[in-house]
Image (cartoon, grey):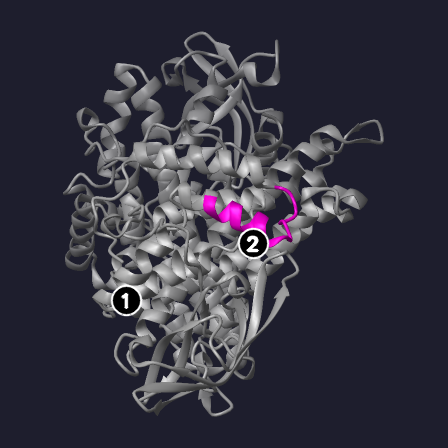
Amino acid sequence: MTTSDPGFSAEDRALLRDAVARFVARHGNRPRGRNAADDQALWREMAELGLAGLLVDADAGGTGGSDEELALVMELFGHGLIAEPFLGTTLLGASLIAALGDAGQRARWLPALAAGELRTALAHFEAASGQSRDPAGTRASADGDGVVLHGDKSVVFDAPVAGLLLVSACEAGGRSLFAVPAQAAGLTLRPWAAVDGRSAADLVLDGVHLPGPSRLGPPGGAAQAIEHALDRATLAVCSDALGSMQALLAQTREHLRTRRQFGQPLARQQVLQHRVVDMHIAVEESRALLAAARASLATAGPAGDESHAPERQAAVSAAKYKLGQGARFVGEQAVQLHGAMGMTDELAVSHHFKRLLMAEAMYGDADFQLARFRAAGGGVPG
Amino acid sequence: MPLRNDPVLATFRTQVREFVQAQLPADLRRKVLLGLDLGKDDYVRWQKILQRQGWVVGHWPRHFGGCDWSPVQRYIFEDETTRAGAPWLTPFGVNYVGPVLCHFGSAAQQREHLPGILSSDVWWCQGYSEPDAGSDLVAMSTRAERVGDHYRVNGRKIWTTMAQWADMMFCLARTGREGRPQEGVSFLLVDMHAPGVTVRPIVTLEHCHHLNEVLLEDVEVPAANLVGEEGKGWTYAKFLLSNERVLVAEMGRIRRMLTQARQLAGQIREGGVGLLEVPGFADALARCEIDARALDALCLAQLGAQQAGAEPGAEASMLKIRGSELQQAISRLTVDALARRGLPYSSGTVLAGDGEAAAVPEGSSGMLREYLFLRAATIYGGSNEIQRNILAKAVLDP
């Protein structure tokens, strides 16, 4: 994945924004279709908009976008409650195949991914190690001309729709990444839906045999690329949360201005005014810190360049920590300020609340991010 | 974030940083970092050093003696000087009355007053708050009656910072009784050495004297010291406040305090390890650092929007709220560290004879004093509750 392409002009970005906004207006703010044919049609539409291959280079059939465009898309998705499996393919699959794959693997998978024909998911975390980014329970060992995988993977977002699972495993004293077809023998997938409607699965790998060319990158050499991809995914989730927080703020503001009690709009009550102000500040500081973290991600360069890694990690964890705290506050206060209406399934408020709950949990909660921020040296740059 | 990566601004930052390293006298820096009492001479000395570069008023227009700095340059200047331990650049002349005179003052007033601000030879103070008009400033009742070629001023001003050193005070006084309360207010320049001016010290909880009450009893102020038009003082006062903008975040001070908190925590041990290894403390410090990153990002975002031509609205209130809360949080953390040694305190000024205990890290009293002083941060400059009222209007009304 290169971010040094000429990239999107302001005009390109405006066009993308309009197209995605129209897509969100058509498909957002409603429960995700449970039937596979609907899902497939929706994904085809997203691929036609260039969203499946948003981060894939143009010469591989992609859109050639950067994390800035991804942030724009995620913010709109969060705002309009789009729950379609997305990051597993568009970000994690595309970036890991581009960063680690050889020419043959890239040619085989990236155009198919951009065309909407191949969907992927990253299977990295494990139940035994929780949020840790260094799980050690899945192992790859030599098996004839290939490898065999043993272990469990948990919280694999987007796995139920993925044709190809990117599975991390310990090998050669390091971490390797393998492309595992969803239909591979010995692979069991236990799908589930998260509280916000997102689809995920837990995996059991019981002697999954893979031929030689299934490894992405050198044996034991995938750790940095995975870490970088997870950082990008973390910020993408933050953008999603930011969109959701903005929607909640707008809906809460509207509610306070129109709902009348004690003979006047709720917006006249100072205690409610100040609460909305605190929600507003949480949104604005989240937006600013997130933009700064994205800049730091861009400075840290592609997955191979690790000289800026500590500051990148600190910046990403700081943003996720702050967004998580802000998301919890805005979500809880939006429900509170809507009163009983905020408890109903009918209002979008409750759906945003659950989406933010999910965002806080994804790719490391507040405790995890704070510890990672400290481990990376913390501090305040500038 | 374009402003963060702008090479021209990076060069400017380096230039300021190197200037401070080379020109900030070591004894002044030591006083600031240890939180010792600074005298008038200390402030003036630093300002005269800055003015060799024209930097006391770098944000003023060039033809008034400034450097035409953009708001972001000014932000960087304050950030770099303050974090390095430079004395507070007292704002009353350079940030408050100076720009008002540049915009609304007569040529004669500019000739008379601007040179003293540039040279720091004239010390200014601000006569706004009154005993019965704090947050609700427009309730002020100090009166200025026109008598011939002068105004006769009567009233009481309070919380007047450093009035004990002041040569001049810019002052809001009521010249009319008609119309809305805002319409009868005028902006006057009062000679603090004139008969009828009495300055009474107010000792604050940290045992320092920086606040005062100023009594004005039949003080004769020449009519030539009316700025702009009679009855338009409220407009000028609002203009003055709009000049503070992103500086209210106090980002430089926050950086300096974080550095000091880290250093202090390295010196204090608990359970066989330094405080930085104690999870509760280390997490709290990390949270402050993350909040500081967020505040800096918010400042730069607002400066970026301003540079792109956005009309300034109520967003500075956000910076005031978050900046003041963060200063209090960091100093609270510092006090939590110091509390392990029992909080010995020596103000060094108001109460004599209370020496600092030998066993505490150097600067302990200064940090404790800063904590005590900073309780004011959420009160001064429009309390945080007032800032939330201002923001509520912007967020809920349109």
> Which residue is located at x 46 percent, y 26 percent?
B237
Q: Nearest the camera: A325 or B185?
A: A325
Q: Residues within 10 Å of mark 1 (few under 14, many from 20)?
A: some
Quarter of the rendering containing residue A277: top right
Q: Which residues are magenta?
A: A29-44
In the picture as drawn, the residue positioned furthest to the right comes out as A262
* Residue B343 visible at all: no
* Residue A276 visible at all: yes
Residue B220 relative to residue A281: left or right = left
Quarter of the rendering containing residue B276: bottom left
Q: Nearest the camera: A284 or B170?
A: A284
Query: What residue sits right under mark 1 in the picture?
Result: A105
Three-letter code, disc 1: Gln
> Which residue is located at x 46 percent, y 82 percent?
A135
Quarter of the rendering containing residue A88: bottom left
Q: Nearest the camera: B100 or A298?
A: A298
Residue A238 relative to residue B54: left or right = right
